[in-house]
Image (spheres, helix red, strand yellow):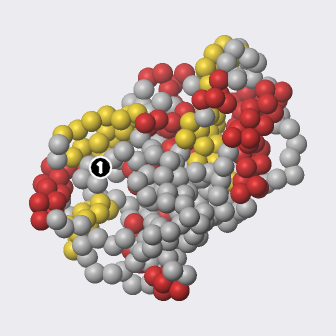
Amino acid sequence: MILPSFELHRPSSLAEAIDLVRGFEARGESYDFLSGGTDLLANYKCKINVKRHVVSLRHLPELLGISRDSIGAGELLWRIAESQEIHESFPALAKAAEWVASPLIRESATIGGNLLQDTRCYHYNQTYWWRVAHESCLKAEADVCRVVPGEKTCVATYCGDLAPVLLCMGASVRLVGPDGSRDVPLSAFYIDEGIQRFVKKPSEILSEVRIPTEARRRKVAYRKLRLRQSIDFPDAGIAFAAELSGSRIVNCWIASTAVGSAALLHPDVAQKAMGRDLGEPLAGELAAALVASARPYRNTFFAPGYRKEMLGVLLRRAMAEVGGFEPAPSQSAAG
C-alpha cells in the first residue's frame, strides 16, 4: 500500500519540534508525531486518521539515553533489549522489549512509540475500502461501534508490551509541550477508552520514561499470549511484581495489557496477596480473581472467553517465575 500525501518535518531539537506545533495549532492545521513509525505509518497506509503534517522525532538528542533511572523516549527497543544496565537492573523490561514483534521492527520501534501505540480493532485496522464497504466504525469514519452496537465509547484494544511491566515498576513519563513540561505517573497516564487513550495532550511529546529507585527492589515477570511467537501483537499480557521478605509478599503489583483500551493495574487483585506466601495456592486464587474481573471484547484474533482464561494462566506463570515454583499444569499455550 502507498502512503498518502503529507508534509514531513525534521526538527533538530525538541524545542524546534515544539515551535512547529505552535505554528500548526495557530493555523488550525492537523499534525502527528513520528518516532519509529512502525505503528503510525501502518495506519497511514490504510488511510486511518491521516494528518497534514508529520513531525519526525527520530534522532532528537533530548529523547536519547539509557540508565537505571530513565530511558529516553526515542530509544530503540533493540537497544533496550540488549542494554546490560537494563538486563542487570530490570530483566523483565529487557525481556518485554525483546518479545515485541520481530527483530526488524525492534530496530525501528521506540519505547515512547510502544507506550503510545494506537489501540487496535478488527473494524479499525483495515484498508480504507474495507472500512467503506463495512460502513467503518466509531474510531475512523463512522459514528457507531461495530463491536458493541449502540455503544458511543470506543472499545478498541491497547496492545503495548512495555506498559504493564513499567506500571509494575512504578514508572512515570515526562511530557513536554508548548505549555512546559510535566511528569505523570504511568498509573495515571492511560484512559480506558479507545480513542482518547491517555492524558497526553496532542501537542505534548513524551520525552522520557522515569524509573524510581524502589523499582530495583521489585522482582518482576511478564507473560503474553499471541497467535505466533513473533511479529504478532499480544492478545493478552500480564506483568506481576512483588517485594518479598523470604517467601512472604510485602507488596505486590499486577498489570494487564491487550484486554481493554488501556494498560491497567489491578490493585484489588494484588491486595489479596499482601502478607501471604508466594506459591501456587496463592497464584491460583489471584488468577481466579483476575479472570472474574476481566471484560475483553471480540475485537482481536482470540475469542474473549479464551483471553479471559489465559489471563489466569499468564498470571500463574509470571508468579511462578518471581517465586521460583512450578505453575499448575495447563493445556493452553502462551509466552
Task: Pick whichever, 251 or 285, lies toward us.
Answer: 285
Q: Residue at x 45, y 44 (%)?
A: 190
- Locate residue 8, reporting x and y percent: 23, 71
Q: Position of residue 64 (x, y in %)?
A: 31, 46
Compared across the picture, whether 147 is left or right of 284 comes to left
Please state which of residues 69 and 202 is positioned toward the viewer in this rendering: 202
- Where is 56 relative to 333, above or below? below
- Residue at the front extreme, as displayed: 150
Vertical order, 288 against 113 (above or below): above
Left or right relative to 176: residue 221: right
Q: Position of residue 206 (x, y in %)?
A: 32, 47
Q: Residue at x 86, y 47 (%)?
A: 330
The answer to whether residue 64 of the structure is visible from this angle is: no
Tell me the residue at 46%/82% (across/down).
128
Residue drawn at (71%, 45%) of the image = 311
Disc 1 is placed on an element classified as loop
Q: How many marks?
A: 1
Q: Nearer the viewer, residue 167 or 38?
A: 167
* Label 1: few (<14), some (14–19) or many (≥20) C-alpha neighbours in 10 Å: few
Q: Is residue 125 above or below residue 220?
A: below
The image shows residue 79 at horizontal and vertical percentages of 44, 49
Q: Quadrant of the N terminus?
A: bottom left
Is residue 226 left or right of 51 when viewed as pictured?
right
Q: Amino acid at mark 1?
A: Lys
Q: Which residue is mark 1?
A: 201
Q: Is residue 49 visible?
A: yes
